[in-house]
């Protein structure tokens, strides 16, 4: 049981002492001793640590592999992991860790309510009732009737299991993609 | 650890395989703990991790959803201290499993040498779990400690 | 142990591969015995077993019996005391090797960590032995002891 | 060692892969030296060598030169004293990657137990380097010493 003063988010107990962890962006090259504090060194190029830690090594930024249809959305830095996204026309498939081509909606879907926004999850085009949960297994959407792509993006929150933002590869009449997938 | 054939998830989505035998047949475990479907490291050290996953489909199991499949395994490490999960190893293949063939089979093997810390957990994810071969000589994974961390 | 390329069975049926070099080229053996085509365990312990098997076909070897193949390896443990043989590991794939292609190649790798007792024997079976790649860097198997049994 | 994704050769010819991380992410090294793209043995001993190589192609990368590919990995040992290089292990497969498919993926795993001498060097060659998956969980190789030479 760590004593109250040695709060576990920024401190750790070592040899009975309450020592300071390394702050985000640094790794612990040496733990504290009876007479010295922890030694923290900055993460190297292409590495990061996003939290206070006792790690002896930083994490490596993932590769936004163009060979899987990915591009860099946020390069990441010593405290924040790199973010990738699929290039337009593709959406991230968590199952196979690749960018899958957005399927085409059948013409019938597009003509029926051209002004509405059809949200299309993975490879199924589905019409969503107003504020109804979508047919996807764990995605929650609200159905907006709107004409402007950017407004739809801001107002619609797409949650996946890992709290990532999933692109709205919507079936606009012009087939324009308004959001970015974040694998 | 060998797959518990009686408790394999269905579907083709990527799933976490959490139902393994750790004490039956070829499965054995020591100095590590198996709980909540994950293999937990008890001692810091350098470990060799490996996994062998077999997928199969017999025509008597009904048609496949698609003939174009991607059969994959991911071996993941979870570090609770920094709330981080990352894939250590992945393997697999895209496959064209023709509907005209009676039987299809494909095995993946991955292995690698990793520094692991006490408290870290190893887990297995696969795509297309319903195609998994449930035999103990087909679908299994494990780890053994090679030496301490200097 | 590496395959003895001069003594590979023919045909496509599953056969026992018993002809291996244990002292030539990359092959080496210690604390285990190779006899009657099987690798015998001399000391109880936890061993890491592995096998790498390569299959190939060149058009100059004449046509294949069929374009639909199942290329497999089985690593088997025989326990003479209880007169029992069981497969420890298996791997492979169904394959469509088109007659129009000049050359086909496919390799399988399996590996796993097993508790073995003195006297038990490890052997290798494959399907389609006539397609085996006889090179020492292609078709080989082995085992090394990781630690004693507690 | 894990592939340095920023420095992968192009083309489809067999090439030597010399750009690896040895200290970042999952990569680690001790008692061996990484220099000139090769892993040098510092201590005589029996080592377990392994390599995992993933190939992938996405339609957005443009068309493949051919739909008929041979995706291979070769693990080679170089003995400077006798100016000799030999393949210890090879693996891979001929593949038909149809132009109609959006995405293709294939992984190879090889592993084996070898006697290595101080000064000898291990290197990796692959075919079709431009198809290599640059992720650290996809393309990596390594070695660990199991025991001394008696």
Image: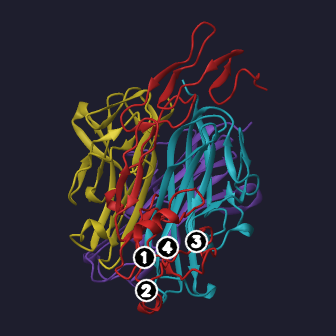
Chain colours: A red, B cyan, C purple, D yellow
Q: Are marks 3 and 1 on the same chain?
A: yes
Q: In the image, is residue A1 above or below residue C67?
A: above
Categorize mark 3 by other alpha carbons within 10 Å: few (<14), some (14-19), many (20+).
some
What percent of the width, then of the height, locates residue D68?
27, 73
Q: What's the distance in space between the residues labelled 4 and 1, CA to CA?
A: 22 Å
Q: Residue furthest right?
A: A1
Among numbered discs 3 and 1, the one appearing first in the sequence: 3
- Residue occupied by mark 4: A122
- Residue occupied by mark 3: A142
What percent of the width, then of the height, locates residue C55?
39, 67
Q: Kindly state the secondary structure of the residue where label 2 is placed.
A: loop
Mark in the foreground, 3 or 4: 3
**Which of the pair D23/C127 is nearer the observer?**
D23
Point out which mark residue A147 bears. Answer: 1
- Residue occupied by mark 2: A114
Q: What's the distance in space between the residues labelled 2 and 4, CA to CA?
A: 21 Å
* Horizontal side, residue D134 vs residue B23: left or right: left
């Amino acid at each position: 049981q760590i004593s109250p003063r040695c709060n576990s988010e920024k401190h750790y107990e070592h040899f009975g002492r309450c020592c300071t962890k390394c702050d985000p962006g640094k790794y612990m090259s040496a733990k504290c001793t009876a007479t010295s504090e922890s030694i923290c060194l900055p993460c190297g190029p292409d590495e990061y640590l996003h939290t206070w830690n006792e790690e002896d090594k930083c994490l490596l930024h993932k590769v936004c592999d163009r060979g899987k249809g990915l591009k860099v959305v946020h390069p990441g830095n010593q405290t924040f992991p790199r973010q990738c996204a699929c290039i337009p026309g593709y959406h991230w498939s968590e199952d196979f860790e690749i960018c899958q081509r957005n399927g085409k909606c059948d013409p019938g879907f597009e003509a029926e309510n051209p002004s509405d926004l059809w949200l299309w999850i993975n490879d199924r085009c589905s019409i969503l009732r107003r504020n109804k949960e979508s047919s996807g297994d764990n995605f929650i959407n609200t159905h907006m009737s709107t004409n402007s792509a950017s407004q739809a993006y801001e107002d619609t929150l797409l949650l996946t299991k890992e709290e990532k933002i999933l692109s709205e590869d919507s079936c606009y009449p012009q087939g324009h993609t308004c959001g970015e997938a974040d694998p | 650890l060998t797959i518990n054939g009686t408790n394999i998830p269905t579907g083709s989505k990527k799933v976490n395989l959490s139902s393994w035998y750790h004490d039956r047949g070829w499965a054995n475990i020591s100095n590590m703990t198996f709980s909540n479907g994950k293999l937990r490291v008890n001692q810091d050290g350098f470990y060799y991790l490996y996994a062998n996953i077999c997928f199969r489909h017999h025509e008597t199991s009904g048609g496949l959803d698609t003939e174009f499949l991607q059969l994959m395994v991911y071996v993941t490490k979870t570090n609770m201290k920094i709330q981080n999960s990352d894939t250590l190893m992945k393997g697999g293949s895209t496959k064209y499993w023709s509907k005209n063939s009676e039987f299809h089979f494909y095995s993946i093997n991955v292995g690698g040498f990793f520094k692991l810390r006490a408290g870290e957990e190893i887990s297995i994810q696969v795509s297309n779990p319903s195609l998994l071969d449930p035999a103990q000589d087909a679908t299994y994974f494990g780890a053994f400690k090679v030496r301490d961390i200097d």
